[in-house]
Image (cartoon, rainbow, N blue to C red):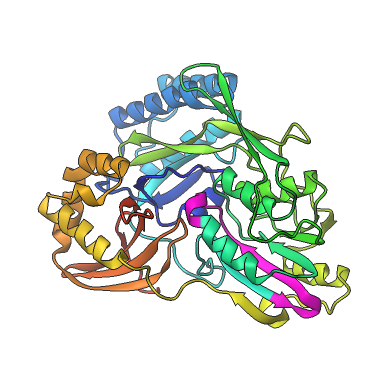
Amino acid sequence: MTRCSTMMFLPLLAAASTASSQATQTAPAPPGATSPASTFDAAAQRSIVEKLSEALRDRYVFPDVGERAATRISAALAAGKYNGLADRTAFIQRLSADVQAIAHDKHLNIMVPSASPPPRGPAAMPRGEAGVTRADKLAGGIGYIEVVGFPRPRAFKPVLDRAMSGLEGSSALIIDVRRNGGGSPETVAYLVSYLVNPGRPINDIVSRVPKTKNFTRESQSSVPTPVSFAGVPVYVLTSKATFSGGEEFAYDVQALKRGTIIGEVTGGGANPTGPVDLGNGVMARIPFGRAENPVTKTNWEGRGVQPDVAVPASDALKVALQKLGHKPVGEIGAASLKRVFAPRSTALPGYEPAIRQLIAGFISGQPNYSAMAPEFAEETRRMLSQLRGDFTPLGEIRSIKFRGPFMMGGDEFEIAFANGTRLMAIVLDPNGKIVAASPPMMVRPDK
């Protein structure tokens, strides 16, 4: 699972990067990030290896593994094994391979930031609101909901409550996490809460205290929900792309004997992770904790969640409907009798003025800190010179168009500047204070 800070400059594709099992990724560039030269000299390589080694030793959830991985890459550097890898991508790939040879951890990633979003295609993630794409009533009173991510509870709870309330009275419930890339353990527990009585232990996260071999434990239990499906048959649909928090949901349901898992073995990533800046345009995600289910006392790391009924992911909905005694239909659009939840199609009140004011403050070098939550204001002060350098060349704002709800809460906008068009997202708290924003990303021509 990836824990998302309550304040930060958020990458626009957080869920997608969490779901990836690649050791080397391209991630959205943070504000102020410049495109480094495509070649790395020895000093840059040494700096990256030293910072990564330190992070592995100080933060990695398994201290002995972190020490061995750090020793391996430090020794490789000293032995000249990275010599000749002047291309940044080749260097990062080799460094990643050396770390993964020890760690074998799909949440441990070394990333090369990029200012452009990945290409869109037929498998692109559907538009959702705080991780929920749709909820439908099917034949026989069966309820269906797709959840593609687990943002922080502040964003997720009101949206999930709206969707699940529309499914109240369902004779059975199908929960589709085939495209779920993960998120907050607390949010996972909230979805599970709809399926069980309050007070049931659901999941634990065991986290390492940085620079020590000590650990803390954070436990989540079920809480009351506006409506309950505690006595309703539940089917959870999975795929090999189901990852991290998506896997945790399926695993928790299975461990609690609260539902039937139908689909494919999931990705196998159970270690919460956090970002580390390695400098020279390179970032890493270092797992700092591990999930521990209170029933099994273990997790799905490296193995994935094993379905109760193993079928290709494309057949999972059809098989679930068959088991419920209904016509097997493979696509939700064809199976739906009534859609009871769809993502918002209008911007939240106050969001467009807030993003205009935020950008104007970046360009002028005089942001309105009173309009920001304290943590976000502190982050903005720290990064102001970089932010000003990012936004000033774009020129004045010509137009702002609402694109849809943002995955992590709030809204995403397409902003046409005098010198280019960018995507940005912004998140406000209940008092209208800015708590998070995304860096500007170039709009692709195939959007």
Image point 65% across, 51% down: which residue? 224
Query: In the visual, does 306 lie left or right of 361?
Result: right
Residue segment shown in magenta: 137-155
Quick check: can you spot residue 331?
Answer: no
**Is the residue 355 above or below the residue 170 in the image?**
above
Q: Residue 70, position in %: x, y?
A: 49, 22
Image coordinates for residue 373, horizontal then vertical, percent: 30, 46
In depth, the one of 409 and 37 nearer the eye is 409
Q: Let me know if residue 231 is in the magenta part.
A: no
Q: Is residue 267 left or right of residue 34?
A: right
The vertical placement of 397 against 138, above or below, is: above
Comparing 167 with 279, the one in front is 167
State the residue at coordinates (56%, 38%).
272
In the picture shown, does residue 131 fall above or below 343? above
Residue 382 vs residue 99, the one in the foreground: 382
Counting from the top left corner in percent of width and height, residue 308 is at: 84, 53
Residue under the point 48% across and 21% down: 57
**Considering the image in quadrants, where does the N terminus appear?**
top right
Picture quarter with the C terminus: bottom left
